[in-house]
Amino acid sequence: MTPITPESKETLTKLRNLLLEQHKLLLDRERATYEAENGDIGGPGKFLTLVLGDPHFAWLKVLSTMVVEIDEAISRRSTAEQPVADALLAQAREVVRPRETGTDFQQRYYAAVQDSPDVVILQCKIERVLGL
């Protein structure tokens, strides 16, 4: 089989960085919503516990999982081959399409895109990297 090409590694690295940045923006938005409904979360430990276990934040696991999968594929120790890179890019093209009707993630992502110029800017950058 064929190892991941340098071009695909570069694309996946750019995508990974943008997804991580988008994840942070979305986490900050969800934290603000959560705190408006439930009061101050407190420190980073309490926030991390909520992010990992509270249903309010569960939809964001789609992005964090994608980042981890990309990290594993492009790490120096990885033996991943080009079909893995192709599959990750295809998955990203499907997942990060905001839709009014679609998966839970796509619907929530759609709402975030409608509401936040910062999310829109990153979405445009993600789409550019993915060739959408």
Image: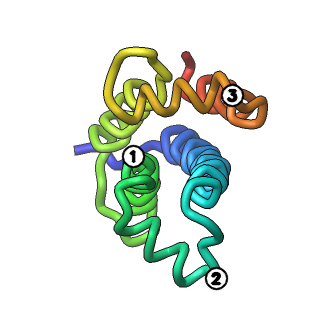
Who comes first in sequence, dot 2 or dot 1? Answer: 2
Label at residue 115: 3
Question: 66 and 38: which one is in front?
Answer: 38
Q: Looking at the picture, does residue 54 appear above or below residue 63?
A: below
How far apart marks 3 and 1 lie (CA) works out to 17 Å
Q: Is residue 35 above or below residue 82?
A: below
Left or right side of 99 for 11: right
Q: Mark 1 sits on what residue?
A: 59
The answer to whether residue 95 is left or right of residue 46 is left
> Residue at (64%, 29%) from the top-left corner?
123
Residue drawn where x is 49% and y is 40% of the image: 8
Q: Position of residue 11 (x, y in %)?
A: 56, 39
Q: Is residue 36 visible?
A: yes
Whether residue 105 sits left or right of residue 80 in the image: it is right
Contact between marks 2 and 1 (CB within 8 A): the answer is no
Quarter of the figure with the N terminus: top left
User: Which image quadrant is residue 10 in?
Assistant: top right
Q: Earlier in the sequence, mark 3 or mark 1?
A: 1
Residue to which mark 2 is pinned:
43
**Kind of residue indicated by mark 3:** Asp
Residue 76 point in image, percent of width and height? 45, 69
Please tell me which residue lies in front, 56 or 51: 56
Question: Counting other residues with Cα less than 10 Å from the Cα at mark 3, is it few (<14), some (14-19), or many (20 or more)?
Answer: few
Q: Secondary structure at mark 3?
A: helix
Which residue is at the front of the view, 67 or 116? 116
Q: Position of residue 104 (x, y in %)?
A: 35, 33
Q: Report the residue at 57% width, 54% height from top.
A: 37
Q: Between residues 121 and 40, which one lies in front from this camera angle? A: 40
Mark 3 or mark 2: whose residue is earlier in sequence: 2
Q: Are marks 3 and 1 in contact (CB under 8 Å)?
A: no
Report the amino acid beneath label 1.
Trp
